[in-house]
Structure formats: structure tokens, C-alpha cells
Image (cartoon, rainbow, N blue to C red):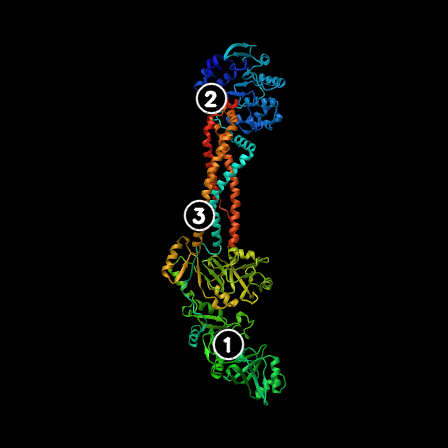
């Protein structure tokens, strides 16, 4: 099995082995005996190929002097089992893992077979209960038993034991020798010893050495050629290439780092700083910047183009009424929707006739006032066409200009009867008018103007009303009274302050039928009517007759000249024809739906609240009607209530969009008070019935008091949901004109505040955004075309670019320091663990595989640093997003792009590779014998 022929070994000038010639048997206990320095251990090292020599050594008929380093390592792993004087175990590992190390390095047995083999060996050496014990907690005798078990784990042909009892007491020494003796019955055991008593007691063969020479060979007994069996399972043949198991490398690395906690922590910290710098650089250019951009995209579609007026387009200050001929042509054009033309005077009649402003009668020389009537009733008279009650004594549909019909409440009727000295009943007044002419006159005076006038009219009938009214069949009767009879000068410059305070402001109106909203919708898009503004008359113009009057009952459409700079609706079809990539736009205005392209504020001009019942909105109105204009309110909405305005639209507030007919589940809206909503909107308002009716409230107008309080005049409007569009955002959908029609026809916002000044287009193809932008600029140079996200994206990208450069610089420095620090740590690791690396080499691990100790150490450190850096990156990203959200008041949801982990992982692997390559040569230079002896 082993044959040595003329073996010489020198250390410098000293001859350690001198012409050694030995022929060992196949099995048995062969003890090499001799004093210290006689060459016993050197002889073992030569046999295993761990040191160079001169001569010839054959193991299993193979000359080991001609073998390569890898072949020698494989020979040691497959053929030899080693038992060292001072145990040479992996001290920080368990007993089981020490046994598994050579077994898993060589064999590819199943896990169960490996464990069975280890259990058999532990039973053999009497350590069954110590399987999971850490080796450094064992006694010396127990450690040597572990070493013996490890030596047998790969079924070696030869077991080499170097002074196995040298560090043990007599009792443990005898136990170990008994065990070795037992093993020698199946294998060749070559043991080095200087203990003569143990040698004589247990040895089958004794080789005596002195001064490097074999001086005597003794055979104590004769031996049978039959092998005896031990209770140990066989591994079976394997051609597996030897590889250190990864589980052992990981375990050994973690145990080693655990012993050097502070050094490891310092290395982790520095490496993680370098990694997190790179990660942050990528996150800034992806996650954080994308979150900012996404927040803006919540308001403005990423592909939206916005059109607004150029700064040099100015409006003419003031309001100017259209003349009779202009209004007349409108009446002819839209005769289907218009009853006739009327006129109103925008004047403060109470200050016009501040000294006397009465309707009176003279009876029997007495001046008697009919209480409640004044000159304002002339202006706010009602067409007799709208008189729905009974007229006493009879209805006259064609009155003379000096004839009137009065609408009287009971109190005024009784007072009039009293002045006439008749019975205070409807019948008596009816009879009186039937038999007598009753003349009334308007008594009007203003001493400052030295103005006094009395205008006589004849009362030809009356009706019972809840409010005082004057009725006439002439649709321009107030014009006749103020201009023909009273001779007041008039002006169409409504907001102009005239030199003469008695100038009346005259406005013609179209009295509409029940299709008022449809008419306004047509007028908005008509090129011929673009020069006009159509204002629904309200209490501003009719303080008495329109006070608290329902918006749908306000049928007088005042006609003004449009002196405001605006984007005409009739041009929109030309915009769409010029570029098929454009989709019908959202119309922005100051009073309804605001669009500020530069600041990306898009949403309802005043907060709109949406609820599934009216009572909830009434409670909100109670809280919001009066509040300080300086106070900041963090709005907390009740359950199932939504709100929307141009500020909170980015925070999940309700937004408006153009309805897509193809995406509707249900039907399209046909009227102003009908809408389509998103599925998210339905869920948020807890709406279960389809179709449903919801309620919305928003201020019609807001007034700032001298005390700094903001007084809001809220209105509640019911809206009918006709369909649903799937979306995870809270959106209401309607036609483009809805942002004008709803506010004018349902809320009562002035048409002067609803002139379109901005358009927001979506695109069919986002890739052609620049083409669309250039085409619009060329086709319509009078407007400013804006890609609202382009500038903000460029700004974000620029800031992130410079931050990325700074972070890359920081990361480069930190990474360089990390490489240096990890290289130092690896150097210290190699120095501190060279005995264990040398042990692996002695057992049979080749140089290439032994470098895995270093690679594993570097890799684990860098991967743990990567994990720490990943946590730091997540924390930094969350903090950055929260700070950005706080600064910009955005309510965007947090999102994280894992792309930042990839460069960190690559860098961590690069750091591990570089530091390992720097130190790998030191592994190759380790001399196993010197390392184990140090």
C-alpha cells in the first residue's frame, strides 16, 4: 500500500530524513517511534505530499512525487484520514459540521446517508450526544474523538495519527489508543508517538527512528489477511470533484464575523454607505423623481397639451350692453328658444329717488300711498304672458301703455280698499274697478338733483299674489316709462361711472322658454354670437323678483358685448381638424374649472362637495359659510363625502374630464344636471342604486368682510348619475361645455367669470406630443401652447442629475474606502484563520477551493452590507418622499422602483470580487504545515 524507497529530506543544511526505506502493510497499527526531532512527523508529511522530498514514495502503487498539487489534494481527501496531536478541528463549528466537512467536500450522498454515516462514527467514538455541540466547548479527549471520527468519514485506506495522545491524560490516552487499535483492524493506521509504553501495548508494527534514519522495525504478532468490519456504513465510490460545501462556508463565515463584531460592524457601515450612495443616485433619477412627476400627472394627463391666451391679449375693462338691433338679430336666429326681447335698467332706484319713491292715489283731496310699491316695480314688472292667477275684474292681454295690472297681497289690498273707503274685500275692489276709473301715480323725487315727477297710470285690474307686482303686456314697458315719459338719459356702459348720476344703465335681454340651457349651449359654440356674453339675470339685476328664485325659473338672458380676451369655442373644431392627434379639450375659466398650466393647478375654482344626501351637505355648509380668510383649514370630510378644488385635486380630490362614450357603463348625460362618474367615485360615496342621484354644493360667490372673514353663499344642486366609467380616481364626466353650463345654469356664477381662457387637450398618441405642439404653434400663433409637464420634468431631471453626480462622487469615495477596509478585513481574516484554511488543505482541499474561505467571507460581508444599504435606501426614499409631499403639499401615494437595488447589488459583488482578488494570492502562499505549527 505504501512503499518508501531512498527517501531523503533536508531543512536547510540539516538532514531530517536519511535514506528511509519502508514498506507498510495493507492494515494494522504501525507506530513510528522515536525521540523528538527524529523525523517521525516529517515522514508522515512526505507520505501525504505536504512537503517536498527526494526519493520515491508510492501510495497504492502510485508515485506521489509525480502528482500535481490538485492530485495530491485529491489523494489526501480520498485515501488518507488525519488525526493530529492538538486535534486541528474547526473550533467554532459543531461536531456534526466538522464531520460533514470532508464528507460533503468529496461525496454527493443524500442528506440522510451523510447523517447516518456521521451518526455511526459518533457512536463508534462515543459522542452520540455531542453531535450538535460546538467544538470549543468539548474536552480534550472529546476533541480527539471528533478528530478520529473525521479521519474515518471518507472511508480512507490509511489513517495518519500524529501524537494523538500527546495532549491527553493517561485515561483518555488509553481510550483513544483502544479506539485507534480497533480502527487498525480494517485500515492501515500509521501513528507517530514517542510514548514507548503505549507503543509496545498497542502497536502491530514498530518503526524506530533516530536522527532521520530507520534503526529498527519490529513486528509484534502475525496478522491475518482478512479485514475485520466496524459498525460504520460505507459511502460507496464517487467520482465527484471535491468542493467545499456552501453551507459550511456560510456557517464558518458567520461564526468568524460573530467573533469580530466591531470590526464587522465598521466594515458593514462603510460598505453600506458606498452602496446606499449609488442606490440613492438611481432612486433619485427613478423613484423620487417619478413620484414627483406622477403627482403632477394626477392633475394633468401626462400627454396633455394646454392652450392659453398670450400675455399681450388684454380685455377691455367694464361691461357694455348690446343694443336693440343686435339683440333683435339674436331673437330672430334663435326664435325657437326665445319668447321676445325685454329690457332692464341696472340702477339703484332707492338712491335714484331717495326723497320720494311711492305709488299713490289722490282721493277726496287726500294723498294716499299704496304701501310697498316704488319705481323699482316699474323696472321689475312682469310680462302679462306670465300672469297665471285670476285677474279681477277681468284679464286684459293688450294693455295701453298707461294701463297696468297690480299683483296685491291681502294686506295691500285691504289698505287700498281702506283708502278708497270701500269694503275691504276682493269683491268690493272688483266692483269698484268695474264701475270707476282708478288712477295711480308714481311720485318720484330727488332733491339733490332738483328732480320731481309724477307719472299717472290707470289701474285696470288686480290679482292676488304673495308679492307685490306690476303686470303689463308691453314687453318694453319699463323702457316706455323711464325713457319716453320720465326722459331719463341712458347708457350701455354698465360699469362706467357717469358724470351725471341720473344716467340709467340699460340692458336688453332675451326671455327664453323652457330650453334656456340648450340655448346657452348653442350660443357658446356659435361663431356669430361669440362677440356677446349671455348673463342669466339674478338678484343683482332684479333684487326683488329674483331673490331666492330657483335657477331653472330664471328665464331672462341679459346680452352684453364680450370685451374679455378669451378662446372662442367655435375655434375648437379648427384645432381638432388641424391635428387629428388632439382630443376634445377641457375648458378652463376663472369661475368654474381653473387651469393654471405653469403651476399645474387644475380643478374646480371653488371647493365642490359631493354627498349621497342633502342633509350631510347642509351640515358642511353650516361649518363653511363663514370662516377666517387667514386660517388654514385641514379639511376632514364626513364618511361618504368627497370634495374637489384646484388645490386638492392632486390629493385625490374630485376632478372633471370629458366623457368617453365608448367607456360608459350606462347611458350618456343628456342634460346639465346629468353626469357620468368613475367607479371609484361610486365606491367613495357608497352609492348602491343605479342610476343614482347625488348632491353637490359649492359657493355661488364669496365675500370678504372688513373683519377678514370670508362669507360664502353656497347652493345645493342635485345631479343625476346616468353611467359609470371604470377608474381608480374620483372623476365626474360630461361634455366640454359643462364647466360653463353647470356653473352658469345650476350654480348661478356670472358668465363674465366663465369665459374660456385655457384649454387642456389629451392626445391620441403620446409619442407625437412634440409634433402636435409644433403643429399648433404653426397653425395658431396667436395662442400660447404649453406642454405643462415638460418644464417640470426637465427641472426635476436637472436637480436629480446634479444630486446624482454628488451622490456618485460620495459613493465613489465611500466605495474606495470600503474596498480598502474590506481588503484589510480580508487580510486579517486570512491571518486569523490561516490555521483553519491550512487544516482544509491538509484534509484534501486544493488551493483553488481553499480560496472560497476568503470569497465567502467577502461575499457575505458585502451581501449583508447590501441588505443594510437596502433598508437604508428604503428609509431614505420614504423620508425623501414624505418631505417632498410636505413641501409641495402633494398627496401622492408612495411607490418604489426596485431598480435602485440592482446597482447596489452589482457594486457589492464588485467590492467583494476586488477585495478577494487582492488577497487571494495570500491564500495560495499559505504553507499548511507552517500554518498549523504556528
Q: Is residue 693 above or below residue 104?
A: below
Instruction: Report the residue marked by disc 3.
Output: 802
Q: What's the mark number on residue 900? A: none
Which one is closest to the eye, mark 1 or mark 2?
1
Q: Is residue 747 above or below residue 435?
A: above
Disc 3 residue crowd, few under 14, some 14–19, many 20+, Cα 10 Å: few
Q: Is residue 224 above or below residue 686?
A: above
Disc 2 residue crowd, few under 14, some 14–19, many 20+, Cα 10 Å: many
> Where is residue 593 shown, x and y percent of the image?
49, 62
> Where is residue 533 shown, x and y percent of the image?
45, 70
Which one is closest to the eye, mark 3 or mark 2?
3
Instruction: Report the residue marked by disc 2.
Output: 72
Q: Counting residues from the N terminus, which is met first, the one under dot 3 or under dot 2? A: 2
Q: What's the mark number on residue 347? A: 1
Q: Secondary structure at mark 2?
A: helix
Q: Residue shown at 59%/58% (left/top)?
A: 638
Report the residue that reaches farthest toward the left: 778
State if disc 2 and disc 1 touch (CB < 8 Å).
no
Amino acid at each position: 500500500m505504501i512503499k518508501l524507497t531512498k527517501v531523503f529530506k533536508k531543512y536547510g543544511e540539516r538532514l531530517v530524513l536519511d535514506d528511509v526505506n519502508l514498506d507498510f502493510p495493507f492494515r494494522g497499527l504501525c507506530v513510528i517511534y522515536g525521540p523528538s526531532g527524529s523525523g517521525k512527523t516529517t515522514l508522515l508529511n512526505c507520505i501525504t505530499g505536504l512537503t517536498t522530498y527526494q526519493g520515491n514514495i508510492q501510495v497504492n502503487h502510485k508515485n506521489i512525487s509525480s502528482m500535481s498539487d490538485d492530485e495530491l489534494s485529491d489523494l489526501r481527501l480520498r485515501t488518507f484520514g488525519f488525526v493530529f496531536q492538538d486535534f486541528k478541528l474547526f473550533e467554532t463549528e459543531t461536531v456534526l459540521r466538522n464531520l460533514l466537512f470532508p464528507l460533503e467536500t468529496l461525496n454527493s450522498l443524500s442528506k440522510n446517508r451523510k447523517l447516518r454515516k456521521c451518526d455511526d462514527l459518533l457512536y463508534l467514538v462515543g459522542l452520540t450526544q455531542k453531535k450538535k455541540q460546538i467544538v470549543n466547548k468539548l474536552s480534550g479527549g472529546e476533541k480527539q474523538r471528533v478528530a478520529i471520527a473525521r479521519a474515518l468519514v471518507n472511508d480512507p485506506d490509511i489513517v495518519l495519527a500524529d501524537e494523538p495522545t500527546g495532549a491527553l491524560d493517561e485515561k483518555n490516552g488509553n481510550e483513544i489508543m483502544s479506539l485507534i487499535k480497533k480502527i487498525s483492524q480494517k485500515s492501515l493506521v500509521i501513528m507517530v508517538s514517542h510514548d514507548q509504553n503505549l507503543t509496545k501495548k498497542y502497536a502491530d508494527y514498530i518503526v524506530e527512528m533516530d536522527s532521520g534514519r530507520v534503526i529498527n522495525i519490529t513486528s509484534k504478532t502475525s496478522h491475518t489477511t482478512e479485514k475485520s468490519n466496524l459498525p460504520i456504513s460505507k459511502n460507496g465510490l464517487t467520482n465527484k470533484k471535491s468542493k467545499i460545501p456552501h453551507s459550511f462556508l456560510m456557517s464558518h463565515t458567520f461564526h468568524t464575523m460573530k467573533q469580530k463584531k466591531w470590526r464587522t460592524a465598521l466594515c458593514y457601515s462603510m460598505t453600506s454607505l458606498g452602496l446606499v450612495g449609488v442606490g440613492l443616485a438611481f432612486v433619485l433619477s427613478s423613484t423620487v423623481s417619478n413620484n414627483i412627476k406622477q403627482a403632477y400627472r394626477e392633475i394633468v394627463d401626462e400627454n396633455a397639451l394646454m392652450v392659453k391666451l398670450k400675455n399681450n391679449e388684454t380685455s377691455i375693462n367694464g361691461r357694455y350692453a348690446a343694443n336693440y338691433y343686435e339683440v333683435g338679430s339674436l331673437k330672430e336666429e334663435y326664435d325657437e328658444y326665445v319668447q321676445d326681447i325685454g329690457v332692464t335698467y341696472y340702477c339703484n332706484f332707492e338712491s335714484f329717488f331717495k326723497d320720494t319713491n311711492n305709488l299713490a292715489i289722490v282721493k277726496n283731496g287726500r294723498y294716499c300711498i299704496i304701501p310697498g310699491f316704488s319705481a323699482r316695480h316699474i323696472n321689475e314688472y312682469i310680462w302679462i304672458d306670465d300672469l297665471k292667477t285670476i285677474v279681477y275684474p277681468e284679464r286684459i292681454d293688450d294693455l295701453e301703455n298707461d294701463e297696468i295690472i297690480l299683483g296685491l297681497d291681502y294686506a295691500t289690498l285691504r289698505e287700498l280698499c281702506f283708502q278708497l273707503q270701500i269694503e275691504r274685500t276682493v269683491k268690493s275692489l272688483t266692483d269698484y274697478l268695474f264701475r270707476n276709473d282708478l288712477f295711480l301715480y308714481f311720485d318720484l323725487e330727488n332733491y339733490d338733483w332738483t328732480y320731481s315727477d309724477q307719472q299717472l297710470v290707470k289701474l285696470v285690474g288686480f290679482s292676488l299674489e304673495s308679492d307685490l307686482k306690476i303686470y303689463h303686456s308691453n314687453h318694453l314697458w319699463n323702457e316706455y316709462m323711464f325713457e319716453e315719459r320720465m326722459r331719463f338719459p341712458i347708457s350701455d356702459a354698465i360699469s362706467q361711472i357717469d358724470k351725471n348720476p341720473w344716467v340709467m344703465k340699460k340692458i336688453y335681454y332675451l326671455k327664453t322658454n323652457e330650453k334656456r340651457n340648450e340655448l346657452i349651449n348653442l350660443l357658446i359654440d356659435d361663431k356669430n354670437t361669440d362677440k356677446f356674453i349671455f348673463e342669466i339675470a339674478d338678484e343683482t339685476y332684479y333684487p326683488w323678483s329674483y331673490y331666492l328664485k330657483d335657477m331653472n325659473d330664471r328665464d331672462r338672458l341679459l346680452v352684453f358685448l364680450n370685451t374679455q380676451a378669451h378662446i372662442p369655442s367655435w375655434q375648437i373644431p379648427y384645432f381638432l381638424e388641424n391635428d387629428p392627434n388632439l382630443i376634445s379639450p377641457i375648458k378652463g375659466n376663472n369661475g368654474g374649472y381653473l387651469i393654471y398650466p405653469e403651476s399645474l393647478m387644475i380643478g374646480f375654482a371653488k371647493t365642490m362637495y359631493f354627498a349621497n344626501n342633502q342633509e350631510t351637505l347642509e351640515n358642511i355648509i353650516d361649518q363653511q359659510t363663514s370662516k377666517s380668510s387667514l386660517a388654514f383649514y385641514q379639511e376632514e370630510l364626513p364618511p361618504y363625502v368627497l370634495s374637489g378644488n384646484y388645490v386638492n385635486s392632486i390629493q385625490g380630490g374630485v376632478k372633471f374630464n370629458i366623457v368617453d362614450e365608448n367607456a360608459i357603463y350606462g347611458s350618456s348625460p343628456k342634460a346639465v344636471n346629468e353626469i357620468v362618474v368613475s367607479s371609484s367615485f361610486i365606491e367613495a360615496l357608497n352609492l348602491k342604486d343605479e342610476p343614482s342621484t347625488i348632491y353637490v354644493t359649492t359657493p355661488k360667490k364669496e365675500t370678504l368682510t372688513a373683519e377678514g372673514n370670508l362669507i360664502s353663499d353656497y347652493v345645493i344642486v342635485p345631479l343625476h348619475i346616468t353611467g359609470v366609467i371604470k377608474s381608480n380616481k374620483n372623476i365626474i364626466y360630461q361634455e366640454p361645455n359643462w364647466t360653463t353650463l353647470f356653473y352658469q345654469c345650476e350654480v348661478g356664477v356670472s358668465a363674465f367669470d366663465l369665459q374660456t381662457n385655457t384649454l387642456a387637450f389629451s392626445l391620441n398618441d403620446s409619442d407625437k406630443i412634440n409634433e402636435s405642439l409644433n403643429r399648433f404653434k404653426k397653425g395658431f400663433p396667436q395662442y400660447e401652447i404649453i406642454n405643462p409637464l415638460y418644464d417640470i420634468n426637465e427641472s426635476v431631471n436637472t436637480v436629480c442629475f446634479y444630486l446624482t453626480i454628488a451622490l456618485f462622487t460620495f459613493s465613489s469615495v465611500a466605495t474606495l474606502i470600503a474596498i480598502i477596509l474590506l481588503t484589510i478585513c480580508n487580510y486579517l481574516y486570512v491571518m486569523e484563520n490561516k490555521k483553519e484554511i491550512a487544516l482544509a488543505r491538509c484534509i484534501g482541499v486544493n488551493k483553488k477551493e481553499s480560496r472560497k474561505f476568503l470569497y465567502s467571507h467577502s461575499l457575505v460581508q458585502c451581501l449583508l452590507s447590501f441588505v443594510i444599504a437596502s433598508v437604508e435606501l428604503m428609509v431614505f426614499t420614504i423620508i425623501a418622499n414624505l418631505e417632498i409631499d410636505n413641501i409641495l403639499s402633494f398627496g401622492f401615494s408612495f411607490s418604489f422602483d426596485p431598480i435602485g437595488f440592482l446597482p447596489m447589488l452589482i457594486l457589492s459583488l464588485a467590492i467583494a470580487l476586488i477585495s478577494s482578488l487582492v488577497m487571494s494570492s495570500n491564500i495560495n502562499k499559505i504553507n499548511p504545515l507552517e500554518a498549523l505549527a504556528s
